[in-house]
Image: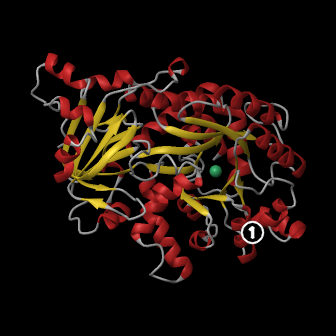
Amino acid sequence: MLQDLPSDVASQHPQGQDNRMSRMHDDLIVEAAAVITVDPEWRVFAPGYIAVKNGRISGLGPTAALSADQTSGLVAKSAAQPAVSLNASPAAETAARRTTRRVQAPRAFIMPGLVNTHTHISMAAFRGACEDIPNRLTKVIFPLERDLVTRELTYWSALYCLVEMARSGTTTFADMYYFEDEVAKATDKSGLRAILGETVLGHAAPDAPEGYGGIDYARRFIAEWQGHPRITPCFAPHAPYTVDAQHLEQIAREAETLDVDVMMHVAEMDFEHEKFSKQGGSVLRYLDSIPGLLSPRLLAAHMLYLDEADIDLAARRGLRVAHCPASNAKSGRLICPASRLQAAGVSLGLATDGPLSGNGMDMQGVLNLFPKMQKVREGRWDIVTAREAVRAATLGGAEALKLSDEIGSLEIGKKADFILVDLDDFNIQPVYDWYSTIVYAMRPHNVASVFVDGRPVVKDRRMTGFDQNEVFERMLRISGECSSYIAQLS
Ligand SMILES: [Zn+2]
């Protein structure tokens, strides 16, 4: 079992908007059976350690080098006083805590936090509703959202999903929905990092009774949250078939002025493909006719209906892609040409999609599917190795969210976003190859602790910033209130 962390770390969490500024906090050293860095040299230290100072990685390497690092001043404060012992008296522990906290986890490994590049976390209340019926988007999802989505549901569903995501090792995610300011509040409370987009629809939306009212809402949302240390707001036009060319051009222009990103579902639907193929040859070529839209600012989710010319276009325009293999498979659509996009130089991350379309919000589900489906798609066993899949779920996701200078791999100077994965379970042993273990054996329950900016947001499988049981009870109440409405849609 892992040695416990000091219990006061929960109180260091930012709670609400008054507490947004990052703050100085104590150093931390975590020793484990292995440290999987996903750095350019693919270094693995087994056994290894990671050291954190002011929320960033200040040292890492083989455990044998730890004392040398300390004496050389790499972890300067820890040299001045002994590390915290579990047996230390409260007074001694308080004194030591000002210097270095030390966690020893000999039966766990450390890897970068997982990055989920496309979600709708506030749809948690609807998970499992109206499965296996045709035209689900127009017959179920839009009516459900119009009639049931409120500020309260958005906030509590988001917080519920955040528990599921954090406890399964996700440290950063991208989300688009309505009342995205409520998603931002929940994210802030959780301690996770996110890119959050306010959805724009051409017809009435739950938070905007007039078509395109989402643009005004997004402007206010961006003004309120721009500059937050962990949350980056942006525009999220829903899709090419729900937002017209004129408004897509307007959004692209405003995103440029405000220096924010744009995220959108692209080339996901068969009817979308049919419609725009007639207009421009393909969805992507139609979008390329809209001034300013196809640019490195655009994070495109799905990208299923692409030909070779589209892949080349995506690379030339610098698009970033969120690949959602589980939700696409469930809806019986095509398999995204993900490995071809990567080969063309497109930044590509993995994603669960929302709880209604992808259901499971843990990244293990998509990490496991990604290489398998690419191998089936291409009819080749030798593409998307386990190592490449791990990269897609971490550094690749960070690249797709334009955060790879700060997160995605474990390197000195980067933000200390990492997870501790317990090796003490039947499903995960034996370990012969770390990458194979992570992709094909690791399951959400193996994740023991999760750190963002060096702060534990999950400690021994429990959220540190709030009472996760209260969130669970709240969701049961909300889903109970939704159940009769959902029954009459089914
Ligand atoms: Zn989506």
- Scheme of colours in the image: secondary structure
In-front residue for pair 32/372: 32
14 lies above or below 34: above
For disc 1, the neighbor class at 10 Å (few under 14, some 14 to 19, many from 20) is: some
Is the CB atom of the residue marked by disc 1 within 8 angstroms of ligand 1's nearest atom? no
Residue 397 in the image, given as x and y percentages of width and height: 53, 55
265 lies above or below 165: below
Residue situated furthest front in the rendering: 72
Residue 297 in the image, given as x and y percentages of width and height: 71, 50
Label tally: 1
Q: Quadrant of the N terminus?
A: top left
- 303 to the left or right of 228: right
Residue that appears at 19% across and 51% down: 65
Residue that appears at 41% across and 43% down: 417
In-front residue for pair 296/129: 296
450 lies above or below 152: below
Residue that appears at 50% across and 44% down: 172
Whether residue 16 is visible: yes
In-front residue for pair 163/390: 390
- 335 to the left or right of 268: left
Whether residue 359 is visible: no
Residue 90 in the image, given as x and y percentages of width and height: 15, 18
Mark 1 element type:
helix
- 191 to the left or right of 328: left
Q: Quadrant of residue 385?
A: bottom left
172 lies above or below 54: below
Amino acid at circle 1: Leu
Q: Quadrant of residue 471?
A: top left
Residue 449 in the image, given as x and y percentages of width and height: 31, 41
The residue under label 1 is: 313
